[in-house]
Image: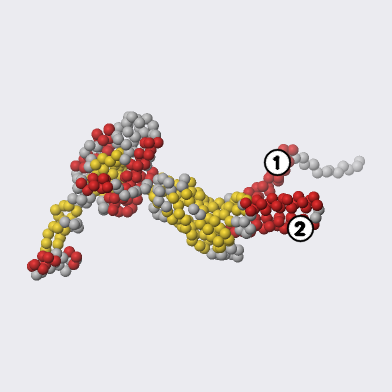
Amino acid sequence: MPKHHAYPPIRVEPLERKATKLTALAMWPGMFLRWFYQNRSLRLTAEGLRFVLITLAVGIAALNTGNNLLYLLLAMMLALIVVSGVLSEKCLKGLSIQRRLPAHLFAGEPATVALRVTNEKRHFPSFSLRISDVVVGAAQFAATHLLYLPPKGSMVHSYRLLFPKRGQFWVEATKVSTRFPFGLFVKIATLPNQAEVVAYPAHRPLPQAILEALETIGHAREASRRGPGSGRYNLRDCRVCDDSRSVHWKTSARQSRLVVRETEAEDQRQVTLALASQAPVGMRALTLTASQDFERAITLTASLAAHFQRQGFAMRLVMGDAELHLGTGQDHFYRILRVLAFSRMTVNIGAPVPSAFLTLSSDTALGQLVILILPSEDVQLRAACQGVTRILVA
């Protein structure tokens, strides 16, 4: 009997599996290009468009005529396009950018942002860089230009940023573009560089009428006790530890001895700024006029806070049911501005007056300065806060 040879079984793959492999193999070049040029975009300049059209014309002429000189010219022009892409990519590679934002930003006021650009490449410099931040909601943002950045070099440039309104903004990324070397293309690299920015409400000088009203309510009263102040409390003999600026020279000359002046201490001046964030009774929905009135009230509150901060007051902020307790100094002032930056007007039909507003009259009775700021006329809130020092309608 002849021996039968055992052949290995033939492996038959399903057609679907073969189609999947072929599809993946066809998609691989595109995936590689997307990975290699991630966060990149390319745009033709006017000169580049003309150059490409001329290249196409030379290519068509070379095919029609078969002239070797035209083929040589076409090869040179195509090489220029390739070299332009390679060198521009080399310029954008290896760049790191650090952003430095101001500590405090205000709506409507330009701020200066500093950018430190570092070229981490060892041998190849970067040329003709245009750098700008992508800020969502910013009214305008300028770019900074670097003509030359040496290898392992670093430069600091700045630009001006303007926020049109208060609130929270996001700096999403930093865009770096270049036209190097021939200006045919603009290659743009988007570098992820996120940052949160809070724009405080704008504060402006108070109108003269409000300043006169604040002066007439006697918020600069002096107490009859010794301490730092402007009024005279007593005259006494000079001591070794006394400041020479406190010497009362007329009395000293008259009595032939050094006499110093003691001043009356001013009250620890306190002010409560109460901003109504609830729409008046009868308003069914927020309108454009109501929103504008509320923004004016926010600006007025921030302006009052800036005024009292310069005067050395201890300030408290009341908004709806929220309250920021008494405090002094720059840090407390910026906390107030941050709360105002995130505040929103609400419409609660039939909602009662917030409990924090019902106690404002008692604070006034204790000698504290209480100012109620209304975005628009509110009869209910005005009636509930009749005892406050002053009511201002924005």
Residue at image location 19% in from the left, 56% down from the top: 229
Q: Quadrant of the N terminus?
A: top right
Q: Give left or right: position of 180 versus 367.
A: right
Residue at image location 44% in from the left, 50% down from the top: 162
Q: Which badge, 1 or 2, is on the more N-terminal residue? A: 1
Residue at image location 27% in from the left, 38% down from the top: 357
Q: Is residue 247 above or below residue 316?
A: below
Q: Is residue 191 above or below residue 249?
A: above
Position of residue 363 measured from the top left corner of the image (x, y, whole percent): 22, 42
Q: Closest to the observer: 204 or 341? A: 204
Binning the other alpha carbons within 10 Å of mark 2 as few (below 14), some (14 to 19) or many (20 upward) gives few
Residue furthest left as drawn: 255
In the rendering, which numbered label is found on residue 72?
2
Q: Closest to the observer: 114 or 67? A: 67
Position of residue 279 measured from the top left corner of the image (x, y, whole percent): 34, 34
Binning the other alpha carbons within 10 Å of mark 1 as few (below 14), some (14 to 19) or many (20 upward) gives few
Q: Give left or right: position of 333 versus 182.
A: left
Nearest to viewer (mark 1 / mark 2): 2
Position of residue 261 measured from the top left corner of the image (x, y, whole percent): 14, 62
What is the quadrant of residue 371 in the picture?
top left
Q: Quadrant of the C terminus?
A: top left
In the rendered structure, which amino acid carries the disc numbered 2?
Leu
Residue 246 visible in the snapshot: yes
Position of residue 86 measured from the top left corner of the image (x, y, whole percent): 65, 57
Q: How is the image coloured?
A: secondary structure
- Residue of label 1: 20
In the rendered structure, which amino acid carries the disc numbered 1?
Thr
Q: Secondary structure at mark 2?
A: helix
User: Distance of mark 1 from mark 2, alpha carbons?
Assistant: 42 Å
Q: Secondary structure at mark 1?
A: helix
